[in-house]
Image (cartoon, coloured by chain):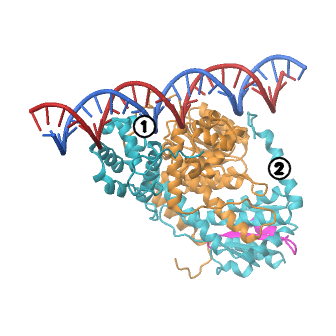
Chain colours: A cyan, B orange, C red, D blue
DNA sequence: GCGGTCGATGAAATTACTTTTCAAGCGTGA
DNA sequence: TCACGCTTGAAAAGTAATTTCATCGACCGC
C-alpha cells in the first residue's frame, strides 16, 4: 500500500508538489525548455491527448512518440509522478475532468430532433429537479397530520383519475401491504357511492394535479361532508379542492413542453409525496407493519422461478 | 474517437458495451445481487471510495477488502472492464469527476425513528440518485431499437404485475394518447391468451424488476414464439426473461431497507425508462403524435371546473 | 582535427504488477 | 452423508513498468 519513494533522481526541478491533476498542461509548458527533445515529444503528446494516452501502456506510448519506454518513464518523473503508472492515472482523471467540463448541464426543453441520449439525460435531469423541488416545497406539518390520520384510519379511500389514479393505486398497494384497509377508485360514480359510506375515523385522499378535476373533487367533498378526514395531493393548493381538504400536500409543477406533458413531472412529484406518506405511516405502525411487509414478501416468493441467487 | 485495437481479437465477452465512466456506482448496484460475497465486498469498496481505490494495486485492493487478487480481477471483469488495470483507470476518472462535481451525496438508510423531515429528504435524495443511476446505465442502443419497434408497431401489449403493472399502465396511457394501440395486462391468464394473438409487427413489453416473475415471463415468451418483437424492462438483464427479449432495458437497483422496499426505487427507475420510450416514440411519430396530444388535452378540458386559470 | 567527456537514448535485464490456473474449501441439494 | 458445483485464494504464468547499462553523438579543449 505504501508508495514507492525510491531515490528521487536528479530532480533539481521545483516539483515538491504532489502530482498535479489538471495543471498538467501548464506543467508541460513550464518544464518543456528543460526537457530533451524526446521527452518534449512525449510531454506534448500526453498534454494534447490525455484520453488517448491514458489508454496506452508505456510501450504503446513509446511507440507512438517514437521513443523508448525509458524516456516515457523519465518524462513521467520530470512531470512529478513516481512513474508512468501514476502519470497514466492522472491522465485518465484529467480526461474525465475535461469530458465533464465539456458537457454543460442540459436544461433545454426536449425537442423533436433531440437524440435519444439527450432525451434520457434531459428527462432524468428534469425529474431529479422535480423531486428536489417537491421535497423543498412539501409542508411537513401537513404531512405529519396526514400521516397521523392515515395511521389511525379505519378505512382509506383514494380518488384519482388518469395518471393520478395510478399514483393512487401505488399508494393503496403499499398501504395494503402493511395491513391497512385501502381502496383506489377510478370510476367517479363508484367513488361517490363509496364516499357516502365514509365517516369520522375514515380517511379520503384525492389526487389531482390541476386541483380542478371535478370527478375527483366530488367524492372528496362527499367524504368531507360525512365527517371523514380528507387529504388532497395537488399541484394547486389554491384550487377548488382546497375547500374540502383537511390537509393539503402540495406537489410541484414543472413547466411542460409539447412533447413532455405535465403528467410526467406531476406524477414524479405525486409519487414522492405518496412514498413519504407511506414511510411515515409504516414508521408509526411499525409493530404491525414490519411483520406484514415480510409476510407479503414471503408470499410472493413462489411466483418467481427458482434460480441460484445467493443473497 | 480512436480506440485501442489491442483487445479486439480477445473478445470473449458478449458485452460490447464500452466500460462506463460514471455509471459505475449504478452498475455496482445493478450487478450486486449476481455477485458472490467477496466480489460484493470489492465492488462496494470500489464504489464507495473510487479515489482511494485508484491509488491501490490489485494486491493492495485485495488486502483492503480481505480477498485475493483473483477476486479483484474477477470483479473488474464483471463490471465490464478487461481487467483491473482498466477498472483502475476508470476509478481515477470517476474520482476526478466526483471531485469536480463536488456533491458527495450522503445517503443513510431510512430508520424507524427518523423524523418526517429526514424521511422526505432521504427519499427525495435516494430517488434522485436512482434516476441518475438509471440514466447512466441505460443502454441507448437497446432503447433506440425498442423505440423503433414501438413506433412501427401494429399493436402493443404490456405485461406487468403489482407495482410494475402500474408502470405498464402509465406507458399504455401515454401511448394511447399519441394514437398507438396499446394494452396493459395484469391478469396472467388473459395476458397469455392475448399473447397468442401476437405476431410479427406487434410488440410485447414485459416489466419486472426481478426478471424472474413467471406471470410476466410466460406471456412474453408466448408473444416471442409467435413472432412479436419483445422488450424487457428489468433490473436483472441476466434473468430468465432475457431469453425471450429482443431488446433489454435495464433499470437500476438501489439497496432496499426494511422500510423502503425495492419496489420504490425500481418503480422510479422503470418510470424513467418508460418515459424515455414514450418520448422517443413521440418524436418518431411526431406528425401524428402532436395533433393527438393536443386533441386529448382538449377533450379533458370540460372535466375541469371552470376557473380563472392562468398558465 | 582529434580525442575525451558527458548527456541523451534505447535495448535488455530486472522488478513490480496483473492475470490465469488450479486445487482446496464450503454450502447445497439429493 | 455424499457428491456436486460454485467460490475462493495461493501460487504460477504472463505482462507491463522500471532500472541498468552500453551506445551514440555532440560539444569542447587540446
Q: For the point 55% across and 79% down, which residue is it?
A: B309
**What is the x, y in percent for residue B280?**
48, 52
Give the CA separation, mark 2 to mark 1.
54 Å
Q: Which mark is residue A57?
A: 1
Using the image, determine if residue B129 lies above or below residue B185.
Answer: below
Q: Chain of mark 1?
A: A
Q: Nearer the viewer, residue B157 or B214?
A: B214
Residue A296's disc is 2
Give the crowd class for mark 1: few <14, some 14-19, many >=20 residues within 10 Å: some
Q: Residues within 10 Å of mark 2 (few under 14, many from 20)?
A: some
Q: Using residue A129 as the reference point, say whether residue A179 is left or right of it.
A: right
Residue B160, magenta (yes or no): no
Residue nearest the viewer, comparing A229 with A283: A283
In the shown orientation, is residue B248 left or right of residue D26? right
Left/right placement of residue B77 relative to residue C24 reads left
The label nearer to you, 2 versus 1, is 1
User: In the rendered view, would you say A161 is above or below D28?
Assistant: below
Give, as a single range, the part of the protein colored magenta: A188-210
Whether residue A204 appears in magenta in the rendering, the answer is: yes
Would you say the residues marked 2 and 1 are in contact, meaning their CB atoms lie under 8 Å apart?
Answer: no
Closest to the observer: B71 or B216? B71
Q: Earlier in the sequence, mark 2 or mark 1?
A: 1
Q: Helix, strand or loop at disc 2?
A: helix
Amino acid at each position: 500500500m505504501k508508495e514507492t519513494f525510491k531515490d528521487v533522481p536528479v530532480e533539481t526541478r521545483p516539483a515538491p508538489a504532489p502530482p498535479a491533476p489538471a495543471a498538467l498542461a501548464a506543467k508541460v509548458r513550464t518544464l518543456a525548455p528543460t526537457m530533451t527533445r524526446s521527452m518534449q515529444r512525449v510531454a506534448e503528446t500526453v498534454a494534447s491527448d490525455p484520453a488517448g494516452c491514458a489508454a496506452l501502456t508505456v510501450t504503446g506510448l513509446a511507440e507512438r512518440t517514437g521513443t523508448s519506454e525509458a524516456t516515457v518513464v523519465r518524462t513521467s518523473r520530470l512531470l512529478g509522478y513516481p512513474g508512468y503508472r501514476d502519470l497514466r492515472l492522472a491522465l485518465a482523471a484529467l480526461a474525465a475532468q475535461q469530458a465533464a467540463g465539456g458537457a454543460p448541464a442540459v436544461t433545454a426543453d426536449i425537442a423533436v430532433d433531440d437524440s435519444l441520449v439527450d432525451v434520457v439525460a434531459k428527462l432524468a435531469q428534469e425529474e431529479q429537479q422535480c423531486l428536489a423541488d417537491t421535497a423543498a416545497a412539501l409542508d411537513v406539518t401537513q404531512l405529519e397530520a396526514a400521516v397521523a390520520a392515515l395511521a389511525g384510519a379505519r378505512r382509506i379511500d383514494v380518488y384519482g383519475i388518469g395518471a393520478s389514479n395510478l399514483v393512487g393505486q401505488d399508494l393503496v398497494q403499499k398501504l395494503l401491504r402493511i395491513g391497512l384497509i385501502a381502496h383506489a377508485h377510478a370510476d367517479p360514480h363508484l367513488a361517490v357511492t363509496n364516499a357516502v359510506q365514509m365517516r369520522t375515523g375514515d380517511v379520503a385522499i384525492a389526487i389531482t394535479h390541476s386541483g380542478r378535476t371535478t370527478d375527483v373533487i366530488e367524492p372528496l367533498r362527499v367524504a368531507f361532508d360525512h365527517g371523514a378526514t380528507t387529504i388532497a395531493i395537488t399541484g394547486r393548493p389554491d384550487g377548488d379542492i382546497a375547500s374540502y381538504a383537511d390537509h393539503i400536500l402540495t406537489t410541484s409543477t414543472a413547466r411542460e413542453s409539447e412533447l413532455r406533458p405535465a403528467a410526467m413531472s406531476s406524477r414524479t412529484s405525486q409519487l414522492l409525496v405518496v412514498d413519504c406518506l407511506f414511510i411515515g405511516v409504516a414508521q408509526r405502525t411499525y409493530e404491525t407493519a414490519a411483520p406484514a411487509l415480510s409476510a407479503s414478501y414471503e408470499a410472493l416468493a413462489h411466483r418467481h422461478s427458482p434460480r441460484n441467487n445467493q443473497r
